[in-house]
Image (spheres, coloured by chain):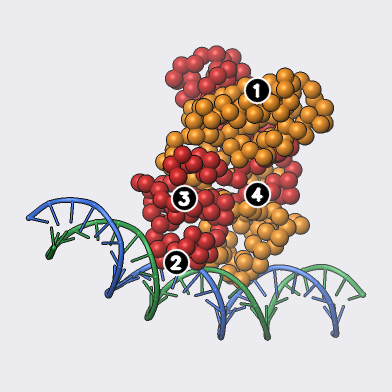
Chain colours: A red, B orange, C green, D blue
DNA sequence: TCATGTTACCGAATTTTCTTCGACGATATT
DNA sequence: AATATCGTCGAAGAAAATTCGGTAACATGA
């Protein structure tokens, strides 16, 4: 699937305004509503876009603690990786998990109602591979730049 | 603003299915469409929810490199923090930035078209406070658990 | 060159959804 | 008991989404 300027524009707008109406979107990209809807459908079916999420302002909803963790495994076997990954995936408080190259194996982002509960989660992650996991916790103080989509302009500038 | 069960339910559904129609949402939470719309409006006006974003599948759209960085400032003055923050905010390739407690000062997530361009961004960030910034780069290998919203059930269980 | 197939577009018609509005009931207050 | 407040419902009008031909542009191959 190749992306022309219009489809890139659709992706770019939709990624930042997921609840825009099809008509408004069509106007913005210069298509009729029906054509625009066709494109959006195809982009969705091709898996280029979706799911659609809303940002919640957690601070206004409840008390919570957000922690970013670096994780190193002493045993870097495939099995160890798999075990740790499925533990991360199965715990809803772990809201994000990456495997990375370099001095760490994983980055996690964890959200818990309070420190006591965070500690429980931390212990649980340590127990997945007893004695073989090294976790450093970093409490989030401020969210300087919340995620608001990828810079498609910068990423696609070569292929313009 | 206090949240009853219905409003929590709305937040929870909307955060994972931002493009759901008001009618469907009303059915799911057991309200009439008009009442449901009222609530959504109030939640938006109160700033509890929004903006609405779409996940893009970057891998299918273009080649790109994703890097998570840990950053330490040698000079931990307020001015140094401010300088680094505004540098992070002004560069679109820096898609996320947190300040944290512990052995690091910042976590960044950076997306660039290739390593050469990533290197440029890295250099730029180092030049903000010459000789006073320590950056460790960790190339993302896999996204084990992409962010799909906060675990409201776990966060609000006390207040049920 | 011409025919054919493909693709994507538009615009009209239909269906669905949104939005507003007035009325009703529950609850709390005076 | 009377009043006020809040949130609900349901109906009606407005807006949006969706479907469905019809058409133009382009590529392919005879």
Asked whether the residues under the numbered discs 3 and 4 touch, taking CB atoms below 8 Å apart as contact, a structural biologist would say: no
The residue indicated by pointer 1 is B135
Drawn side of residue B127 relative to residue B28, left or right: right
How crowded pointer 1 is (Cα within 10 Å; few <14, some 14-19, many 20+) is rated as some
Marks 1 and 2: CB-CB under 8 Å? no
Residue B72 coordinates in the image, percent (x, y) = 71, 23
Say which of marks 3 and 2 sits in front. Answer: 3
Mark closer to the chain start, 3 or 2: 3
Which residue is denoted by mark 4 in the rendering?
A56
| Residue at mark 3: chain | A
Does any portion of residue B43 appear in the rendered image? yes
Q: Is residue B22 above or below residue B58?
A: below
Q: Chain of mark 2?
A: A
Given this view, does label 3 or label 4 mark the residue nearer the observer?
3
Measure the C-alpha gap from mark 1 to mark 4: 30 Å
Which residue does the numbered mark 3 point to in the structure image?
A8
**Left or right relative to C21: residue A20:** left
Give a yes or no on whether discs 1 and 2 share a subunit.
Answer: no
Q: Secondary structure at mark 1?
A: strand
- Label 3 vs 4, first from the N-terminus: 3
């Amino acid at each position: 699937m190749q992306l022309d300027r219009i489809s890139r524009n659709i992706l770019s707008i939709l990624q930042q305004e997921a609840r825009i109406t099809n008509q408004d979107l069509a106007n913005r990209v210069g298509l009729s509503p029906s054509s625009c809807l066709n494109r959006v459908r195809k982009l969705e079916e091709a898996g280029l876009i979706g799911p659609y999420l809303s940002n919640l302002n957690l601070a206004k909803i409840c008390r919570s603690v957000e922690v970013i963790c670096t994780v190193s495994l002493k045993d870097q076997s495939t099995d160890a990786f798999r075990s740790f990954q499925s533990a991360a995936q199965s715990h809803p408080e772990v809201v994000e998990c990456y495997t990375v190259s370099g001095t760490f194996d994983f980055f996690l982002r964890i959200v818990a109602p309070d420190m006591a509960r965070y500690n429980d989660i931390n212990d649980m992650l340590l127990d997945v591979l007893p004695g073989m996991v090294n976790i450093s916790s970093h409490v989030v103080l401020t969210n300087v730049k919340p995620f608001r989509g990828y810079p498609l302009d910068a990423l696609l500038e070569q292929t313009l």
